[in-house]
Image (tube, helix red, strand yellow):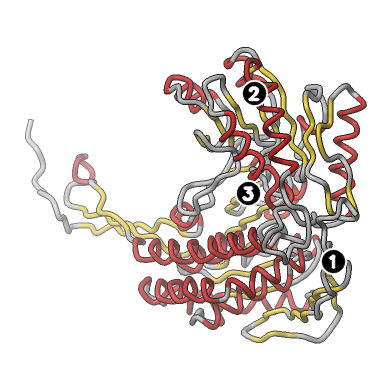
Amino acid sequence: MLDDRIKTAAPPDVTEVGCLIAGKWIMGGARATRVGPWVRSTVSAARQATDEDTHTALAYARSGAKAVARMSPSARAQVLDRAAAAASAQRDRLARLLALELGKPIKDGLNEIDRVADTFAVSAAEARRIGGEVLPVAGWGRGVGTTALTHRAPVGVALAITPFNAPANLLAHKLAPAFAAGNTTILKPPPQAPAASAAVVALLLESGMPQEAVQVLHGDGRLGSLLCAAPEVGVVSFTGSVTTGAAVARAAGAKRLVLELGGNAATFVCEDADVAAAARICAVTGYSNSGQSCISVQRIYVHRERFDEFLETFTREVRALVVGDPLDPATDVGSMVDDDAAERVVAWAAEAADAGATITTGGRRDGATVAPTVVASPPADARLIRDEVFGAAVSVLPYDDFADVVATCNDSRYGLQAGLFTNDVRRIVTAWRELEVGGLVVNGSSNFRLDHVPFGGVKDSGFGRESPRWMVDDYSVVKTLLLRGMSLFGDQEGTR
């Protein structure tokens, strides 16, 4: 084992998960099993959707979309408010499923379910805000005597493809706004978390979501391609890797797309920063969920004047993290999603060390559990710097000039979010203006998100913004009504 702080968990019972098709949970048929990366035994088994299931689900979604669209915004909001309360009430059970299927520490799982509740509540509020506007058409001569109004109408059928790293909250971020906007959704959950995903859907149904509003199909990439290409689907929301996102876009063709594809997030620690606070925050947010977050702290650039101080403090904070059983409330770092992911992190750290970097702590694994790893001064072309590590490793590098380090950060295919520790307002404005990212967190690390604030990236990090307000826009279309010979404004033509 990594050290004597790691404890052993007893194998849990296996959770059987069905496909939800046309209002019924279908249990029989071929199944795929999920082996928990910490307990090392089967924790869930999900029925795999067939081609016939796919055709049935698409036909049902097309007809069911009309029933959902006829619900009033108030009715949809009430369902989502009840679901928010239910998520809070069931947070322990849902967090346990996340721990078993993913090795996610229970404290991280509880935080994720709290965010699910927030996302449902915010989506309920956004359902109540859906409306339209009266357009000022009479301001131009050809518009005199006409009234023009708009309203937002549902797209119809949404497809949500969710990732393993935050399967409950990212499901909520796709399904709740889609329902708030009056759509039906077909959900393809991650194979690594079928039980946790199905449990959130069941919670929504128990809260009054009509059966026409959601279906769940478990399967592999082929299923995802079939669903993306289906003409019944009007909008696709996907969170995952750049490679898979490109495949989703190709399969979907001329459809609305919301793609959140990842990053190699940087955080800057300037010479005026509170180094102790920055080190503490980066340690917690660099290794929560074993670093498996698209905005997890991956690169930390520290002004050379404070570099040694920060590296020493940061390493000490990282060594203090508790690695162990994800069901233990004291655990900070559990396991990664699987052994291959853990091996990638260790291998990339070793490559950087061979190229001249220093591993100040970690750099080893036991199964899918990676000891939190700190890599000091890796070369600029190291994979730890250029690519998305998506794991329990953080690189720390010195910089001399702020403008130069901003340019260094921008020399990346990714651009999702960044963190900045400073009290210099001019530097903050410069970073906000110059950094090629979708969001900047000041006096916090890159790994901070509010679920009611727009979230998304630029470049290969994707496009679109995930947050209920902005997702409602993506899940709806503007419909215009023109009333000829009827004007809310003056209708007399001007004279010369």
Q: Position of residue 96 (x, y in %)?
A: 69, 71
As shown in the figure, which amino acid type bears the numbered disc 1? Answer: Thr
Q: Nearer the viewer, mark 1 or mark 2?
A: 1
**Is 371 drawn above or below residue 31 in the view shown?**
above
Q: Are marks 1 and 2 in contact (CB under 8 Å)?
A: no
In this figure, which residue is indicated by the disc labeled 3?
Answer: 259
| Mark 2 lies on residue | 302
- Residue 76: x and y in percent read 42, 73
Q: Determine whether, in the image, residue 249 is placed left or right of residue 465.
A: right
Query: Relative to residue 302, is residue 238 depicted above or below?
Result: below
Farthest residue, direction front: 4
Foreground pick, 237 / 383: 383
Classify mark 2: helix, strand or loop: strand
Q: Could you say which is closer to the camera, residue 267 or residue 57?
A: 267
Which of labels 1 and 3 is toward the front? Answer: 1
Residue 112 percent location from the top left of the image: 60, 60
Quadrant in which the N terminus appears: bottom right
Give the mark, 1 or 2, whose residue is nearer the N terminus: 1
Q: Is residue 78 left or right of residue 267?
A: left
Q: Earlier in the sequence, mark 3 or mark 2?
A: 3
Q: Report which residue position mark 1 lands on.
A: 8
